[in-house]
Amino acid sequence: MENFFDTINDPEVNDDEFTPEGPKKWNSVKYAKKLGNTEKVLFDIAGIDKDYPIVIGVSEVENRSVLEDIIATPKMAPGNYRISHYDSPEARGVDVAFMYRPDVFKLEGSAPIRTQIPSLPNFKTRDISTMWGTIDGEPFFFMVAHWPSRLGGKDASEFKRIAVGEQMRRIADSVLKVNPATKIVAMGDFNDDPTDQSMLEGLGAKPKTKELQPEDEDVVWERILTEEQDRRTVFDRLKEGDGSFLLLRNTVEDNRLVGLLKMRYVVPEELLRVLGSVKMADMVRNHTLGSILLITEIYAEPDSSIHDPEQLLLTEALAHSLEKRCSYAMFLPASEPSQAALGAVTRQGFVKADGFEGDRRLWIVDMHAPLVLVQNLETTVKEPFSSNPRILNAIYKAHRELQEAMTKFYPGELVLSLSASVIYHRLVDKITQINEVPGEPTEPRVLGKCMCAPFGKILRGKVVPNTVTKTIHTDKVYEPDLDSYSIEAFPYYSPLRSQVRAIKSFNRPVILVDDLLHKGGRFEALEPLLKEEGVEVKKVLLGMISGYGRDAIATKGFEADSIYFIPNLKFWFVESTLYPFIGGDTVRRDTMKVAGLMPSVNIVLPYMVPPLKGCSEESLFEFSACCIRNSRDILLALESEYRALFGRNLTLSRLSEAVILPLCPDKGECVNYDPNLAASVYLDNDLEMLYRISKLKKL
């Protein structure tokens, strides 16, 4: 409404500017003119929709009497509006409020929520006004807010708007936790643009592009669709029809567009129209009651410098849909998909729908309880090997084969593959936002008030700009019988309590950072120590958190945020921990079989039975064999490149020259390793033993 004050001087607030005697000479004539203009605008909106708006959120109104004057105007009175309004603590006395039609919106309750900016506890601004009820029987939750202004400059004041955006997102999450079917509507004057961090990272809003920009269209035509036989048809189809685009850009090369995915959400009532088949619509409807992700186009630049762009696009679409409580997805391309697009789809667990009628083909996947694979092998190999094309090709091939093996566990269910590199990059961005510091190093260096404390290997080799960073070095240690484990200090580092005390000595609020939180794990082991030592935890920041993990951390009184949220996580694997000699978890032993290589276990056969329920024995064997083969093939590539570079063999005793933290599979106290042999030799042996065990199924 922009400074909609009445003409009466209120001694409780600073409204002197908008009084007849004030600088604005705000008298009854000016007030009546503004009232008439407001009436006209709102009535014109009603004219467009051929009906009065159901809910109108307003900001910058002084009090309830102004709202009562608006709804009493001749053109607005037929709408029979009611008001939801609360006085805010803002110095000038301006408020936010709702006007709603009680004949359509059935109000069940309303409440003001005090706006909170953690770093400015005494900051007073407009409240977040909320109200909830139903429309045609469907639950709705409305929020209206007026975020802090850009006074002092956009960048200097942005942290305030990010804080309010995060608060509104937490409010929305708490509502959805009680009833996931609730439709959340956030409105108001946000003093930012849809692409600003307060909207994307704070509020969690996602930009949706209804049509490509002209400069993007040129790239799509000239670089992305170059191998399409009917390029004009595909190009025109992309620009038409319903749906929003998920765009992938190369930030290293002038933020150039390299891929796109077209998607939208459909409700069960739309399935017949979308699929054109009663049988298929019924089949999908039997699997879900909520909205369904529909993907119709996946295209990426051939030979892009970004590896597997189709998978990156698909992962982001699926992950975003999981956060929206979407439990089913369909891939229904209008024409034959590329091998790259189809490969990305099937490796994430999509299966072809049998019996689908018509010329088009349909792939479907159940998303209600996904398996998650964190792709991190690139972070486990040292330079110059980590950038060696042959090594990278071996890693990429291994990842594709591992995805395919995982789809056999629960056919037709989602296998979500997340990139550790993407997670780490976004974690660094979030850390700098929370710490209210620039995302680039500054000269002179100016540190934020908080410090960052990553757990274990996460963010290894990453620099967090303008932020004090100290790692808490942890290790997961199994007992020799593998029945139990504990979280301990990493070998040769001080005990965990001593490390926590070192964190405390900085006397700064701490941002704890971990890769994921589900059940158990590092946070539960460290949380008591942090409290006992009086460490002030600003926020727990995670690469991925499950619904269980979010509930667990909330009960302990900590505020958490994450890059990805998986409401109902079935199980997760970190890729490197599956590969013998490259990664794994430590096993408690008194001695090392090879100097510098801790005894370890990988959760694959024949070392350990993968902890999955309800899948076939054959899928467990094939998954285990895939992991051992992949590790062997990566090590063979490393051994070959090491030999070419240094003129000697990469033996077990030298493995730490190529792998950052190599380990040695534990086979008991009596079995030894020859440090002069290559790791790949032992993996060939383990693979042979696995195939012997697999023959038990035939007895």
Image (spheres, rainbow, N blue to C red):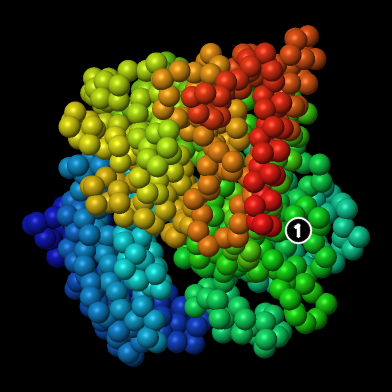
Residue 316, percent across and down? 58, 53
Residue 153 is left or right of residue 552, and the answer is right
Viewer-closest of 451 and 141:
451
Viewer-closest of 257 and 312:
312
- In which quadrant will I find the C terminus? bottom right
Question: Residue most toward the front?
Answer: 699
Residue in the image at 41% along x and 27% along y:
588
Q: Is residue 538 visible?
A: no
Residue 222, percent across and down? 84, 49
| Vertical placement of residue 486 versus 139, above or below | above
All told, the count of numbered labels is 1
Residue in the image at 49% along x and 78% along y:
289
Question: Residue most toward the top?
Answer: 647
Q: Residues within 10 Å of mark 1 (few under 14, many from 20)?
A: some
| Vertical placement of residue 278 versus 256, above or below | below
Residue in the image at 46% along x and 79% along y:
44
Q: Is residue 164 visible?
A: yes
Residue 436, percent across and down? 36, 34
Q: Which secondary structure lies at badge 1?
A: helix
Name which quarter of the figure residue 421 lies in: top right
Residue 261 is left or right of residue 436, and the answer is right
Q: Residue flagged by tag 1: what amino acid is it?
A: Leu
Residue 413 is left or right of residue 33, and the answer is right
Residue 167 is left or right of residue 662, and the answer is left
Residue 114, percent across and down? 21, 55
Question: Residue most toward the left?
Answer: 11
| Vertical placement of residue 44 versus 29, above or below | below
Residue under pointer 1: 342
